[in-house]
Image (cartoon, grey):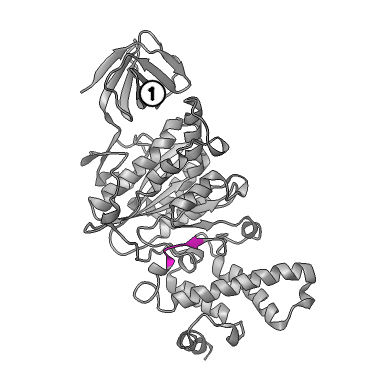
Amino acid sequence: MSITYKGLKEIVGSLVLVEGVKEVKYEELVKIRMPGGEEKMGRVLEASKGKALLQMFEETRGMELKNAEAVFLGETMKIDASMDMMGRIFDGSANPLDGYPNPIGEISLDINGNPMNPYSREFPDDFLQTGISGIDGLNTLVRGQKLPIFSGAGLPHSQIATQIARQAKIKGDFSVVFGAMGITFEESRFFINELKRTGALDRSILFVNTADDPVIERVTLPRLALTTAEYLAFHKGHEVLVILTDMTNYCEALREISAARKEIPGRRGYPGYLYTDLASIYERAGIIKGKPGSITQVPILTMPEDDKTHPIPDLSGYITEGQVMVSRNLHQAGIYPPIDVLNSLSRLKNKGIGEGKTREDHKGWANQIFASYARGQEIRELSVVLGESALSENDKKFLKFASKFEEELLAQGQEEDRNIEETLDIGWKLLKHLPREELKRVKKKEIEKYLDAKED
């Protein structure tokens, strides 16, 4: 039931204060009616002591204080979800951007979702292939996992995001929900054109908010995307991959709203509830016992000044199950995708690899590759100080291995989709250049099967 109140008390930026209200609820939708018949939508940010603070979805310039009406609709924001959304592009208010009419909704869902009972969660343990060797081989993504990508300004995280959206594979009905927040117009066209060009748009749903769109849409968009993903996963049984970029823009929008509300700031000016707010997004990934479908989440954030101790990557790392780091040094060296495997981590990796999932040699292979590359990196730093002439023959082999690893296993074209077999075979090919006695992390039978056999 809607309730109408006349007159607005105050307008500050995108915030509107209404006084003399009763029984108004947090997150409730509100419609502001102008004397000329124009209407603007907003939501309740705060309600107490007969006052309601509204966050408007649209521009507030030109709004009249005295003659406007505030109509409280008595419900929170919902999205009408249906399978007709597949292949479509929407804005941060779920309005179509592709020129086609609104799809007919099958079910209306609250965008804030329902908390997932920890008892009903199923532990993620199935391999999800991205087609990118640096992820599949050494920082494996598991179905139902939340694994963010930590990047920096000017690094190719947009290309990595679209490559994952195009190439990701798992058994069953597979869908991608792509949410972009606060991006430039050029970036939005890049995402849309790439997915259209490769045909990946047919299995995808896009939500796009550009930098000149309202700030409130930036806060709403990830919840629209995740609610749509929950519909696909838990109502239709799809395996859903949700890609959210850029979470830094989302957090900046939160900070802007918090500052407008004159809240006491936390670390670096971000609101004190930033951790809780991010958790309300990240924790919507997972698998529910007894229900088909799953939601796997890959949020992407750009670290200000490449600082991983900044509140956004710092808090994201606490909530999620690892991180994939994008390296500026590798990018400058011409390596794509420039994934820093030594500083990356997938905490659920071992649950998604091995016999019946990837290959029986994967775990030992990953341990050996990781250890050998780490040693090669140490020797590389040492050679800068002492010179290559001071290195032993074994050291030179590890140094060569590190370079070959970056050039042949890490580096792959933006159009190159490698399956896990190809990734593992490239790794074994590199390991044969190391002394046999140094291969201590792989089993003898694996050496005989994947190294000796190939040499013969």
**Amino acid type shown at disc 1:** Leu
Which residue is pictured at 42% across the width and 60% down the height? 167
> Residue 92: where, in percent of width, then height?
39, 36
- Asked whether 137 falls inside the magenta stretch, the response is no
Residue 13 seen in this snapshot:
yes
Q: Relative to 399, is 421 on the left or the right?
A: left
Which residue is pictured at 71% across the width and 83% down the height? 393
> Residue 86: where, in percent of width, then height?
30, 47
- At mark 1, the secondary structure is strand
Which residue is pictured at 47% across the width and 30% down the height? 257
Stretch of the chain drawn in magenta: 345-349
Q: Nearer the viewer, residue 195 or 365?
A: 365
Q: Which residue is mark 1?
A: 54
> Residue 37: where, in percent of width, then height?
32, 14
Q: Nearer the viewer, residue 34 or 52?
A: 52
Residue lying at the far top in this picture: please name it.
66
